Amino acid sequence: MRWLRKNLIGIIAILVLVYLFIPIAVIMMLSFNNPKGKYNLSWNEFSLDAWTNICGVPGVCSSFVTSIEIGIISTLVATALGTMIAFALVRYRFRGRSTTNLLIFLPMATPEVVMGASLLALFLNLRFPLGQGTVIIAHKARLQGMDPRLEEAARDLYADPRGVFRYVTFPLVLPGIMGAALLGFSLSFDDFIISFFNAGTLVTFPIYIWGAAQRGIPVQVNALATLVFLVALLIVLTGQFVSHRRRRALESPAPITVDLMSRS
């Protein structure tokens, strides 16, 4: 009982992670399946057809590429605007600062159905053609914890504003920017409700899966989903490895060199 009380939180965490990863494991397993009928819901026999012919079903790869393009463009625009707004909110005091912060939070708190319907009404009233452009528009702080004295120290060492930003500010906020960009890309790639309202005839990957679910999702969808998960896992592990290497480099003591000539 003492051991159980000591490790209870760890056991619960492991059980929660297993519960969350079971659906992913099922998707990965079914990507190697050769189903009997059109529904890939039960295991039949092992096959690599979905991986060797991943674009064999019409519309799978085109919708996947469309979601990738929308996610990249939306992430670049949102990250650039979000970074500039974050600098303004954290570093400067101006009238309406708290109101601006509230307005930025409101779209995240608004239900996606309401957001998608309101954007659709806006685009229709403006007679804006629905398609990739409207989806990109629809899909649109580590700074708070950064010590400003680091920037002040760089200025005291006669660094110009450009040099301070390049060598001090930007390296400090880069991990937060990259994390926000990856999160924004995943949210944009995975979005269905807002895309469904504003896509028009455009078919993104979630919209394709929704339509294919009515007649049987092809095995290639499982293969693409597995590929996305493996790439995301590789990015996370690479980031953790680089962070660990940097942490060890900072914690390791600098080598001590002895000048023998000066001692003699």
Image (spheres, rainbow, N blue to C red):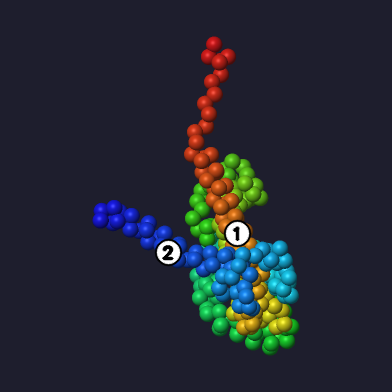
- Residue at 56% x, 83% y: name it: 114
Q: Residue at x 66, y 77 (%)?
A: 208
Q: Nearer the viewer, residue 56 or 101?
A: 56
Say whether residue 160 is left or right of residue 249. Answer: right
Secondary structure category for the residue under label 2: helix
Q: CA distance from mark 1 to mark 2?
A: 20 Å
**Looking at the image, which residue sits at the far top?**
264
Question: With respect to residue 163, does 254 lie above or below?
Answer: above
Residue 147 position within the rendered picture, expressed as x and y whole percent measured from the top left: 50, 51
Which of these two is toward me, 144 or 260? 260
- Reply above or below: 107 against 117: above
Q: Which residue is mark 1?
A: 230
Counting from the top left corner in percent of width and height, residue 129 is at 74, 83
- Residue furthest to the left in view is 1
Residue found at x 62% / y 42%: 158
Q: Is residue 124 visible?
A: yes
Q: Is residue 129 left or right of residue 2?
A: right
Q: Secondary structure at mark 1?
A: helix
What amino acid is found at the position of numbered circle 2 in the picture?
Val
Question: Where 224 falls versus 175 (above or below)?
Answer: below
Dot 1, how many residues are within 10 Å of its Cα: few (below 14), some (14-19), or many (20+)?
A: few
> Residue at left 37%, top 56%?
10
Q: Determine which residue is flagged by label 2.
A: 16
The image quarter in which residue 216 lies: bottom right
Between discs 1 and 2, the one toward the N terminus? 2
